Amino acid sequence: MFERNRQPEATGWLTLEECAAAVDVTPQGFSKTFRPHAPPSAVRNAGKKGVLIHFRQMLDAYIADRIAKAPPRTGDPLMDVPDSSPALERWRLARAEMEEIALAEKKHEVVAIAVMRPGMNTLISVMRNVAERLQRQFGNEASDIYNEGIDEAIKACDRMFDQLTGKPGPAHESSDQVNQKVDGRHEGEASNEQKN
């Protein structure tokens, strides 16, 4: 093995066994993994000792080869793995899709349905309040016509959201449910006025 008395650093030339010991592998492992990277000028015949290898030149060539063959780094350890498996490929595809969606959101090309639904609910509430005002001012017929229009708009929006998401969204109140609440409030207001 490696001779402790000898100063290989002074010459840079080591036997195969000394090189293997320096990188903590067997001589066979060194011959298989590292030696093929040694340039011809880094290997010379040493007679009965076998060969001498200029360790620094061989190591520099090995590192340069590894760097040249390495895939570009993405910063994500799972993306940088050269070998692939079906699960890893699915993960990579999912990751790429997420990045595309994030980019589209930044460009304002898409809007998340989860963001749109609360806005639509707010709009529907405002429209229902208008229906209540119509009922108070012009009677039930005016509010019924308006509420039918709101119900149709809600159904159209729900169908659109359901098609986009593939699952049914939350149910909205129908105009009948709203009218029952409105009638209940008006009755409560009337009884409060009678008490005063």
Image (tube, rainbow, N blue to C red):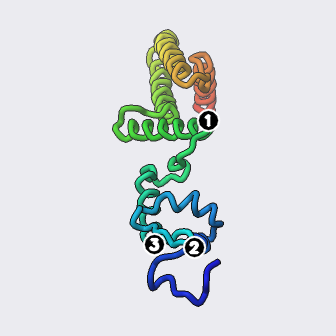
Q: CA distance from mark 3 to mark 2?
A: 15 Å
Q: Give whichever of discs 1 and 2 has the lower sequence position.
A: 2
* Residue 112, label in figure: none
With respect to residue 120, does 70 lie above or below?
A: below
Residue located at (59% from left, 18% from top): 174
Given the image, on which type of amino acid does mark 2 rest?
A: Lys
* Residue 54, label in figure: 3
Given the image, on which type of amino acid does mark 3 rest?
A: His
Mark nearest the camera among 3 and 2 is 2
With respect to residue 178, does 192 lie above or below?
A: below
In-front residue for pair 144/191:
144
**Which residue was labeled with disc 2?**
49
**Which residue was labeled with disc 1?**
86
Q: CA distance from mark 3 to mark 1?
A: 43 Å
The x, y position of residue 160, in whole percent, is 50, 19
Residue located at (44% from left, 36% from top): 101
